[in-house]
Image (cartoon, rainbow, N blue to C red):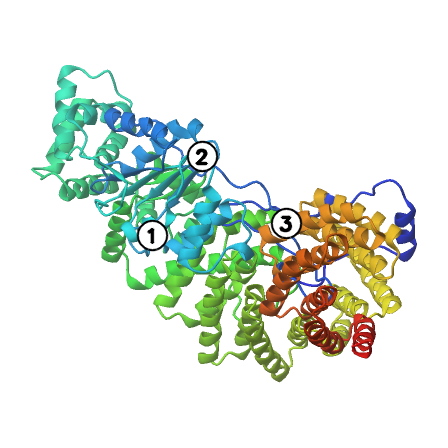
Amino acid sequence: MRELSRLTHYSKGYLSKIETSEKPLTVDVARRCDEVLATGGVLTALARDELEGRARKTTLATGQPSAVGPPLTHTLPRHAAAFTGREDELRRLLSAAEDAAASVAIWTIDGMPGVGKSALAVRAAHLLAPAFPDGRLFVELHGHSPGLRPADPADVLAGLLASTGMAPSDIPPGLGARAARWRDRLAGRKVLLVLDDAADRDQVEPLLPGTAGCMVMITSRRRLVALDGAVPLTLEILPPASAVELFARLAHRGPLTDAESNAVADLVARCGHLPLAIALLAGRLAHHPAWSVADFAAGCTAELGELAVGERAVAAAFEMSYSALPPGRRRLFRCLGLHPGADIDAYAAAALTGCSVQRVRADLEALYTDHLLDEPVYGRYRPHDLLREYARTLTARDDPAEERARSVARLLDYYEHTARIAGGLLIRFARNASPDVVAAPAAAPALPDRAAALTWMRAEQANLLACLAHATAFGRHRRVVGLTSALAPWLLLDGPWEQAAVLHRAACAVAGDCGDPAAEATALQDLARICYMLGEYGEARAVEERALALVRRLGDRFGEATALQILARLDILDGDHASAADALERQLHIVGDLGHRHGEASALQDLARVRAMTGEYAEAERLQARALASYRDLGDSLGEATALFELGRLRRMTAQYAAATRLLEHVSHLYRNLGDPLGQANCLQELGRVRYLSGDHHGAAALLERALGWYRDAGDVHGEAEALNSQAALLADTVGPSQALPGHREALTLARRARIRMEEARALEGIARCLAVRGERAAALTALAEAVTLYRRIGTPEAGRAADLLNEWTASR
C-alpha cells in the first residue's frame, strides 16, 4: 500500500508563481536514483498517493515511487567459446524456430550429469535469438543442485511475471492464477524460454506458454516423458572424434598429429567422453605450453588408471584437477561447498575464506580458467553441480567443524550487513535498527546510491534467501531475525509479498520465542507493512497494535512514532479521520522532540491530507506548506511533484479548476520525467475529474479511461474504484443511468472488498442517483441513506450535501 507521505518542497509564493506560469518548470531529477529494472525475476512498480480518504499501498512500502522500466528481455548466460560437436542436435533445435510459429515448440534435453545439456541449450538459444525478439529468458530450476531446494514454480512465475513489467501488487496469489496470467502476458509475443535443470513435469508444466510464437528448451537429468507435446532430445556422451576435438580446442593445441590424436583418444575414453571431465583435464594442459600432448596424456592415463565410464571417471578427473591447485586455491574451492546459495562474487568469497578481495578475485578467475567454475555473468561464479558436491565432500573431510562454522558465520555476517546498508537506500521512512547488528565485514561493495543498492539486492536475492533458509534449517534463531530484518526493505520493494509475509511471520514468532521484544517489535512493523500491501488490513492493524504496545514498554519513542503513523493510515483507509488526526498529532510531537526532520515532514503532510478530507482546506494548505518547506531543505526532487499534485487536488476541491488544471498538467510532465507511471495515472484521474466539473465531458472521458487502464495494469484497487466512480458519474450525465450503473456497482464491489470507505460512499451515492432517474425510488433512498451514513462516519464535507439530497427525496416521496 502506498505511503501517504511523498516528499515535497515549495513555498506559497512559489506556488502562486507556478499557477500563473505558462512555461513548464523543471525538477532536479538527478537527485532521484530510482532505478527500476527487471532482473532475475523481479520488477517493481512503487508508490501511489492517497486520494480522498485512503492510503495507497506502495509508498507505504518504500516511501518513494519506482519507474517501471523496460522489461529485461535477455538473461541468457554467455555461451562457451569452445563449444564442440552436437551438430545434429543443434540442427534439430534451430529448425524448431519454424515450428514455434504454428504452436509452442517445447523441447526436453535430458542426459547424465556433466554431459553438456545446459551448454547445448545456451548455445542454441544464442543462435535462435533473432527469431525471438521479445525475450530470451534463462531460468534456473535447481532440480538437482546440491544443498538447494528445487525452485517452487509459483515463485518462478512471480519472477517471470515481474520480468514482463508487472508490478508486485498485480501478481496474483496461487500457482494456477499466476500460470494463467503468465500465459496471458506471453500471448502474441515471441519469447524463448530456457528452463535449466528441471526436477520433474510438475515443476515445469505451469511455466509453459500457451500460444504460438514461443519456444521452450528444458534441461533435466530425467526423461520428462509425461510432458505433453514435448519433443525429447537425449544427449549421450560425446562421439570419440568430437571428444578429441573438444580436448584439443580447450587445451589450445592443434592440429594434433596422428600419435597425439591417438593418445588423446585414449585419455578421453578413460574420462568416459564426458565434456565436464574432458574440460578439466584439457584446462590443466592449457596452463603448461611446454608440456607435450603425448607426455601429458600418458601421465594422466597412469593417474586415472582403469576406470569405468561414468561417475568414477569424473571423480578421478576432479581429484587430479584439485590436487594440482596451490594450497590457498584448494581451500577456496573447498569453501565454495559451504555456500548455501547458487553463485558467489569476490566479496562473498572473501568473507567465506577470510582472505582479501584482491587475492580471492584472482583465485576465482584461476578456478574459472581451470574449468572448476563457470562465470555465467561478469564477476559471478558458480561450480557445476557435480563440482559443488565434490567441494562439499572435501570440506567435510579436510576442514575442522569449528573452521567451517566460522567461515559460514563470516559469510552470513557479510550478507546481513550489506543487505542492511542496501535496504537503507531503498526506503525513505526510517526503521529501527536490529538489536543484533552484525560487525562490518573486512570488505563490501560500494553502494553509493539507490540504483547501486537495487542492483546488488537483485543480483544477490537468491543467495540472501538461501542464507535465510540455511539459518532456519540449522536453528540459528537470532540470525533468522537479523537476516529477515535486513531483507525487509527489499521484500517490501520487490515482493512477492505473499512470500514476504511468510518470512516476517516466522521472524515474529522466532523473536518472541527468543524473548527479544525489540527485535519482535521491528519484525511486527515489517509484517504490518506487508499486510497493508496485501490488503490484509485487519491483520495489519492487529500486528501494528502489538508492535505499539512493545515499543511503548521498551520506551522506544521512534518506534512509537512509526506505529502511530501506520495506524493513522489504516484509520484514513477506514474513514476514521478523527482517530487518524489524533495519532498523527502524537506522532508529530514525538518526532519533533527527537529532531527527526523526515518524520516531522511526513507527519505534517499526512495530517494535511486528513484536514483536506474533512473540508479544512486552509489548515490543510498551512500544514502542507510547512511540510514542503522541510522537504525543500532536505533536497527531495521527487517530493516536488507530489506536493504540486496535492495542491492541484486542493484547487479542484475548492472549485479553482483553471489553477488545478495548470498544476496537474505540470505535475504529469514531472512524473513522466521521473519515470513514475502511477503518479501519471493519479494526475490523469484528477485532471479527468477537473474536466468533468468544468463541463469538458469529452476530455474528461478520455483522461479517465487512460487512468483506469493504468490502475488496472498496476493492480491499484483504490485507483481503479475511484476511476470507475468518476467515469460512471460522467456517463450518468452524458449518456444515462443505465450505462452508469455497472461502473458504480463494480466500484462498490472493489471498495467493499478493500474497505475503501470513501469510494464505497461515492459508489452508493452514484447508484442512488442512477436508480432515482430510473424511477426506482425505494432502492435509491436505501442506497443514499447508506452513503450518508458512511460520509458522516468519515467526516467528509460530502455528508452535508448528500444528507440534504436525502431529506429532499424523503420529503417528496
Left or right of 381 in this view: 525: right
Q: Amino acid at mark 1?
A: Cys
Residue at 28%, 25% in the rendered image: 91
On the image, the x and y values in percent for residue 267 come to 14, 29
**Which residue is under mark 2?**
190
Q: Earlier in the sequence, mark 1 or mark 3?
A: 1
Q: Position of residue 15 (x, y in %)?
A: 88, 53
Residue 149 in the image: above or below residue 596: above
Nearer the observer, disc 1 or disc 3? 3
The residue drawn where x is 63% and y is 53% is 711
Q: How many marks?
A: 3
Q: Earlier in the sequence, mark 2 or mark 1?
A: 2
Amino acid, disc 2: Lys
Residue 404: x %, y % from top left:
33, 60
Residue 789, quarter of picture: bottom right
Categorize mark 3 by other alpha carbons within 10 Å: few (<14), some (14-19), many (20+).
many
| Marks 1,3: beta carbons within 8 A | no
**Is residue 489 or residue 401 the one in the foreground?**
489
**Residue linked to disc 1:** 335
Which residue has dot 3 on it? 710
Q: Quadrant of residue 89?
A: top left
